[in-house]
Amino acid sequence: MGHSANSLLGLEHPDAKWRAIRRFSTTELLAPRRLAALQSLCRDKVQGLVRRVSELAERGEPVRVRHVVLDMALSLMLSTIYSVDLDPESTAVFRAVVEEAMLLIGTANLSDLFPAIAALDLQGVRRRVAELFTITYRQYDEQVARRRPERDAGEARRNDLLNVVLDMEREWQQKGSVLSHDAMRVLFTVRTCHFFYDHLSF
């Protein structure tokens, strides 16, 4: 999948790609202007969360706090990256994928303890994690495939991170940059998973 070749966790510090990805993360993902622009979006998502809880209360249904908070966190991240929201069914699927991936990553794995037998993947942990990341990568690829024709057709520009990446792709290619489609796919996937994971204690 190329995950380890593009993830900050898998790159040697201070490898050139590690520095480039970290620089992009700092200047784009965590830039003050980007965080300031998120304030109104955060308010909208919190208001949506309150409405959702109120609707459940009115119907006399139990509120699964963990799920509604995770769904709000996912909605916030996807709006920031792609300017989209998933439907409830897709949100539930993504939530389940991330939760399983995080649990597997934290699982004691014989392959990590005994490098000589790592290739055998006796517990199937690496194989399953690869399958889960493939699902999340598909989301990024689908969003890119939708956005390119919109841009080519001159549709209204969206102020999200995906547009930033697509704007810079040609520059990266011309300069022979280590940043690429694959690197951004890993970065956005991992960032979404980490943001999601931060809320798993609910």
Image: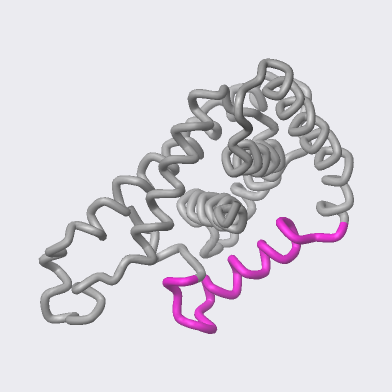
Q: Residue 126 sits in which quadrant?
A: bottom left
In the picture as drawn, the residue positioned furthest to the top comes out as 59
Magenta stretch: residue 13 in it?
A: yes
Give the colouring mode of the picture. one colour
User: How many numbered discs, if any?
Assistant: 0
126 up-or-down from 119: above or below: above
70 up-or-down from 55: above or below: below
Instruction: Residue 94 in the image: state x and y as whole percent.
Output: 47, 37
Magenta stretch: residue 107 in it?
A: no
* 62 horizontally vs 96: left or right: right
Q: Is residue 180 visible?
A: no
In the picture as drawn, the residue positioned furthest to the front comes out as 60
Q: Residue at point 66% right, 44% down? A: 73
The kind of secondary structure the magenta stretch mainly shows is: helix
Q: Residue at point 43% right, 40% down? A: 96
* 107 horizontally vs 27: left or right: left
Instruction: Residue 109 in the image: state x and y as whole percent.
Output: 25, 70
Q: Nearer the viewer, residue 21 or 10?
A: 10
Instruction: Residue 116 in the image: state x and y as whole percent.
Output: 12, 81
Q: Residue 11 sits in which quadrant?
A: bottom left
Q: Residue at point 63% right, 32% down? A: 63
Q: Nearer the viewer, residue 143 or 196?
A: 196
Q: Is residue 48 visible?
A: yes
Instruction: Residue 19 in the image: state x and y as whole percent.
Output: 59, 75
Q: Residue 146 sits in which quadrant?
A: top right
Q: Which residues are magenta?
A: 9-32
